[in-house]
Amino acid sequence: MTTAATPTIRILVVDDHTLLREGINAVLSDFADVTLVGQARNGVEAVEQYRLLQPDVTLMDLQMPVMGGVDAMLAIRAEFPAARLIALTTYKGDSQAGRALRAGAAGYLLKGSLRLDLHQAIHAVHAGRTYISPEVASEMSTYFGADALSAREFEVLSLVAQGHANKAVGRALAIKDETVKAHMSAILAKLGANDRTHAVTIAIRRGILEV
């Protein structure tokens, strides 16, 4: 049982949507051993608030204006290598999770499962362990070892996702139509896609492309 003498885990919440911050705060209020010490609306504010408060655990949204969550985590970890960060997102894609973990996140949670997972995640990360939402862990397991898209393949697929045909992609990237087709063949093979539309759908679901 938590008493006045029992230290609580100090939390910084970062999300650009007021209603979502309020929702997260409401979930946190149910935990007697957790204390909300600060909030931020974007990555720049997150870095500033982290310097000021140096919380035990930071809950970081990934999709934000001014500075996104991944860049904010990189900035915080560069200055505070021991920072304990949990990425919050609506996307369960393995690629986006991988970017967050490489940026220093020790936790990756879906916003839709916060009431189920948040308390356990906070304690795990605070104790120096990693916590990943079960749905995300399953996705990462499914695609473990899959070939990543090269930088050029990513550029090609990004343009295809914007509705450009091969010729337009070739003009935009100053490469031949045959080269575009070769890249698309490689993309389809790596993603296990049937066609261009299917490749874009898979890439969005996995967080390779952001919408």
Image (spheres, rainbow, N blue to C red):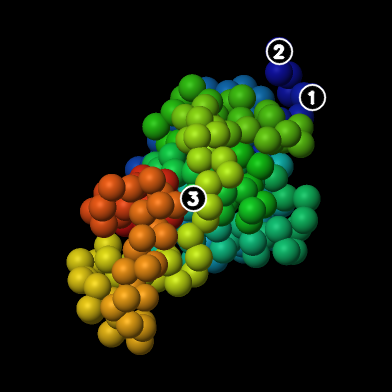
Q: Residue at x 53, y 52 (%)?
A: 147
Callout in the foreground (2, 3)? 3
Pinpoint residue 54: horizontal percent, then vertical percent. Answer: 71, 51
Front residue of 37/98: it is 98
- In this image, 200 relative to 68: left or right? left
The residue beneath circle 1 is 5
Q: Kindly indicate whether the residue at mark 1 contacts the one at mark 2 (C-beta within 8 angstroms).
A: no
- In the rendered view of the protein, which quadrant contains the N terminus? top right
Lower position in the chain sequence, tag 2 or tag 3: 2
Q: Which image quarter is the C terminus in? A: bottom left
Q: Amino acid at mark 2?
A: Met
The residue where tag 2 is placed is 1
Q: Horizontal placement of 125 versus 160: left or right?
A: right
Q: CA distance from mark 2 to mark 1?
A: 11 Å
**Looking at the image, which residue is at 29% across and 78% down?**
177
Q: Which residue is mark 3?
A: 96
Residue at the image point whose x is 53% and y is 46% from the top: 146
Depth check, front residue: 124 or 95: 95
Up-down relation of residue 4 to residue 153 (above or below): above
Q: In the rendered structure, which amino acid carries the disc numbered 3? A: Gln
Disc 3 on helix, strand or loop?
helix
**In the figure, 85 relative to 121: above or below?**
below
Say if residue 109 shows up in the picture.
Answer: no
Q: Amino acid at mark 1?
A: Ala
68 relative to 177 in the view: left or right = right
Residue 37 image position (x, y, % from top left)? 61, 44
- Say if mark 2 contacts mark 3, CB within 8 Å: no
Q: Which corner quadrant of the image does residue 3 belong to? A: top right
Indicate the position of residue 64 as horizontal and vertical percent values: 43, 59
**Disc marking residue 36:** none
State the CA–CA distance, disc 1 to disc 3. Answer: 40 Å
Q: Dot 1, how many residues are within 10 Å of its Cα: few (below 14), some (14-19), or many (20+)?
A: few
